[in-house]
Image (tube, grey):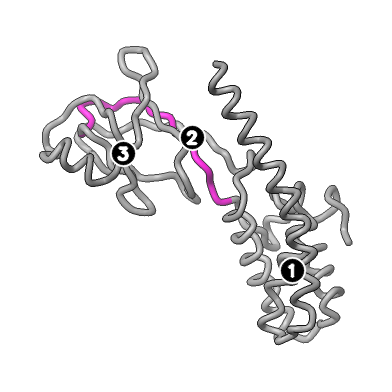
């Protein structure tokens, strides 16, 4: 298997072909789909520093609906700058914001935000100025393909990515005999990643309490 330092998208595809012992066109054409599915499943199971991102922007005066960054997955925190001071914008349910600020044409300093849909937030009150804003959020890692040869998965989770991709190939190949093997290998490496994830979250909470 390719080492963590050396894994690229192309080497992963080569490894998948070798492990599957399949080079027919139908299977090779599906490998990008298997890789994409494995990336999504790994990302859904863990939170990691590789996809923790800060985005800065300006709110638009009079606009309560704010566009989320590309590849957004989950918001951690939001704040704005008011009179030179950074102030938190607190997460609340969508219904709370609508009840709290029923007339979106009225404006004030934003105090709360909610998920409006997958691509937008709702803030309330509706901004009365173009406040500088900062959002800390988890994003979907740039997917692997022939033009994007490496990402967090190839650098820090190559084993999980390899065995996760092989596992995703099994339903297509109808190879039930190999499912247990790849599931076991995948679960082994994911358990290690999850342990690191829990430690990292614990460290983050400790820092937050002590700060």
Q: Earlier in the sequence, mark 3 or mark 1?
A: 3
Picture quarter with the C terminus: top right
* 69 in the magenta segment: no
| Tag count | 3
Along the viewing direction, whichever of 205 and 71 lies nearer the viewer: 205
* Residue indicated by mark 1: 183
**Label 3 to label 1, Cα distance in Å?**
38 Å
Q: Which mark is residue 64?
A: none
* Residue indicated by mark 3: 92
Compared with residue 201, is residue 151 higher up or lower down, i.e. above or below? below
The image position of residue 125, as x and y in percent, is 21, 32
Q: Earlier in the sequence, mark 2 or mark 1?
A: 2
Give me the residue at 59% from left, 60% from top. 40
The image position of residue 156, as x and y in percent, is 76, 47
Give me the residue at 43% from left, 29% from top. 134
Compared with residue 30, is residue 66 higher up or lower down, i.e. above or below? above
The image position of residue 57, as x and y in percent, is 40, 32
Callout 3 crowding tier (Cα within 10 Å): few <14, some 14–19, many ≥20: some
Which mark is in front, 2 or 3? 3
Compared with residue 73, is residue 29 higher up or lower down, i.e. above or below? below
* 128 in the magenta segment: yes
**Label 2 to label 1, Cα distance in Å?**
33 Å
Give me the residue at 78% from left, 66% from top. 184
- Secondary structure beneath label 1: helix
Q: Which mark is residue 136?
A: 2
Q: Which residues are magenta?
A: 126-140
- Secondary structure beneath label 3: loop
* Main SS class of the magenta portion in the image: strand
Compared with residue 199, is residue 186 higher up or lower down, i.e. above or below? below
Residue 126 horizontal side relative to residue 46, left or right: left
């Amino acid at each position: 298997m390719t080492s963590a330092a050396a894994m690229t998208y192309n080497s992963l595809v080569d490894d998948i072909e070798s492990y599957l012992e399949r080079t027919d066109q139908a299977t090779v054409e599906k490998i990008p789909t298997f890789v994409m599915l494995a990336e999504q499943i790994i990302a859904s199971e863990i939170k990691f520093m590789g996809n923790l991102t800060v985005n800065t922007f300006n709110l638009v005066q009079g606009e309560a609906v704010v566009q989320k960054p590309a590849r957004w997955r989950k918001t951690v925190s939001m704040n704005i700058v008011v009179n030179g001071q950074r102030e938190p914008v607190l997460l609340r349910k969508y219904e709370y914001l609508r009840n709290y600020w029923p007339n979106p044409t009225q404006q004030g300093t934003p105090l709360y935000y909610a998920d409006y849909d997958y691509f937008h937030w709702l803030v309330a009150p509706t901004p009365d100025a173009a406040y500088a804003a900062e959002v800390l959020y988890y994003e979907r890692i740039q997917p692997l393909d022939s033009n994007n040869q490496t990402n967090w998965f190839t650098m820090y989770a190559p084993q999980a990515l390899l065995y996760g991709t092989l596992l995703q190939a099994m339903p297509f190949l109808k190879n039930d005999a190999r499912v247990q093997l790849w599931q076991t290998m995948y679960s082994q490496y994911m358990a290690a990643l999850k342990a690191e994830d829990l430690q990292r979250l614990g460290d983050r909470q400790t820092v937050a309490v002590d700060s």
